[in-house]
């Protein structure tokens, strides 16, 4: 019955839509994240942002 929850949410959203400012904010965030993902995909991840692998911990008896 999860589809009923989505229908109620869609009904509520249709009756009281978000403001233009909220829509612009969300769309700009999505565009920024897509741009960041595209740069990371084609340019690559910078070496300075990569963490060094942690040394394995050994248990001492």
Image: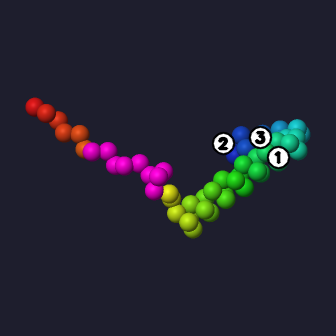
Please tell me how crowded label 1 is: few (under 14), some (14-19), or many (20+) other residues with Cα within 10 Å: few
Which is nearer the eye, 25 or 42?
A: 42
Q: Quadrant of residue 61?
A: top left
Q: Position of residue 53 (x, y in %)?
A: 34, 49
Q: Are marks 3 and 1 in contact (CB under 8 Å)?
A: no
Foreground residue among 29 and 44:
44
Identify the residue under disc 3: 9
Q: Which residues are magenta?
A: 47-55
The residue at 62%/63% (across/down) is 38
Q: Is residue 49 magenta?
A: yes
The residue at 50%/57% (across/down) is 46
Q: Say whether residue 12 is visible.
A: yes
SS label for mark 2: loop
Instruction: Classify mark 2: residues with Cα within 10 Å, few (<14), some (14-19) or many (20+).
Output: few
> Where's residue 18, x and y in %?
85, 41
Identify which residue is drawn at 19% across, 39% down.
Answer: 58
Residue 19: x and y in percent read 88, 41
Label drawn at residue 23 = 1
Q: Main secondary structure of the magenta part?
A: loop
Q: Nearer the viewer's eye, disc 3 or disc 2?
A: 3
- CB under 8 Å between discs 3 and 2: no
- Residue 54 among magenta residues: yes
Query: How far, Cα to Cα, is label 3 from label 1?
Result: 17 Å
């Amino acid at each position: 019955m999860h589809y009923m929850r989505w229908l109620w949410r869609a009904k509520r959203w249709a009756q009281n839509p978000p403001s233009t400012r909220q829509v612009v904010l969300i769309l700009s965030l999505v565009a920024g994240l897509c741009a960041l993902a595209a740069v990371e995909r084609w340019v690559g991840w910078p070496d300075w942002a990569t963490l060094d692998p942690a040394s394995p911990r050994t248990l001492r008896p």
